[in-house]
Image: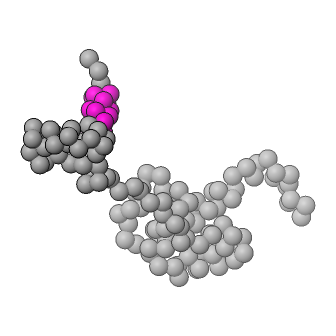
Amino acid sequence: MQSRKTIRACLRALVELVEDEASQNPSFAAKLDAAFGSTVATRSARVRRPQRRQRVSSAPDIFAAFKEKGAEEFSFWLRTLDQPILKEVVRANGFDPARASQRWTDSDKFVALILEQVRARLRRGSAFLPPRANGSSV
């Protein structure tokens, strides 16, 4: 027995074939109307699913802001942003793959998450960098 997806695909192909023939052959369309009544949909009246639009991110570049402002000023700057912008920053940068932050209402939670994730991503790979030249050793 064929899977449901295969059967659905076959039936959709059959319906599209019948619609194409009905739109090109008026006598065939008349026979369909006689057999099924006037409920047969034509291709022009067919309902299509709306396509998903890709979101345009309005989130600021937080990595550039972190490097420009420094850690402490960056924290204060994040607190000046509105909650929808903080949510967009989290979504645009993939800081919460489990999407636990979707239910948050406290802006301080978003600020803490963003700070933690920015620091973690900027530290990534630092073990492979040479030691700093200012004399501090590991």
**Residue 21 place in picture, x, y as percent:** 29, 38
Q: Main secondary structure of the magenta part?
A: helix
How many labels were placed on the picture?
0
Q: Quadrant of residue 31?
A: top left
In this view, the residue farthest toward the bottom is 80
Which quadrant would the N terminus be assigned to in this image? Answer: top left
Residue with the most extreme top position: 1
Q: Is residue 14 above or below residue 41?
A: above
Q: Is residue 77 left or right of residue 44?
A: right
The residue closer to the viewer here, 53 or 86, is 53
Residue 110 in view of the camera: no
Q: Is residue 128 visible?
A: yes
Q: Is residue 106 above or below residue 122?
A: below
Was residue 11 drawn as part of the magenta stretch in this picture? Answer: yes
Q: Please tell me whether residue 14 belongs to the stretch shown in magenta.
A: yes
Q: Position of residue 58 (x, y in %)?
A: 53, 72
Q: State the residue in front, 64 or 119.
A: 64
Splitting the image into 4 quarters, where does residue 14 fall? top left
Q: Which residues are magenta?
A: 4-17
Left or right, 96 with reference to 60? left
In the displayed structure image, the side of residue 68 where residue 84 appears, left or right:
left
Camera-side residue: 138 or 53? Answer: 53
- Relative to 96, does residue 76 appear above or below in the rendering? below
At x 29%, y 49%, the residue is 43
- Where, by quadrant of the figure, is residue 64 drawn? bottom right
Q: Position of residue 111 (x, y in %)?
A: 51, 70
> In this image, 81 relative to 52: left or right?
right
Query: What kind of colouring is applied to the model shown?
Result: one colour
Residue at point 30%, 30% (across, down): 10
Query: Depth check: 135 or 35 in front?
Result: 35
Q: Give the residue drawn at x 48%, y 56%.
A: 96
Residue at 38% over, 66% down? 104
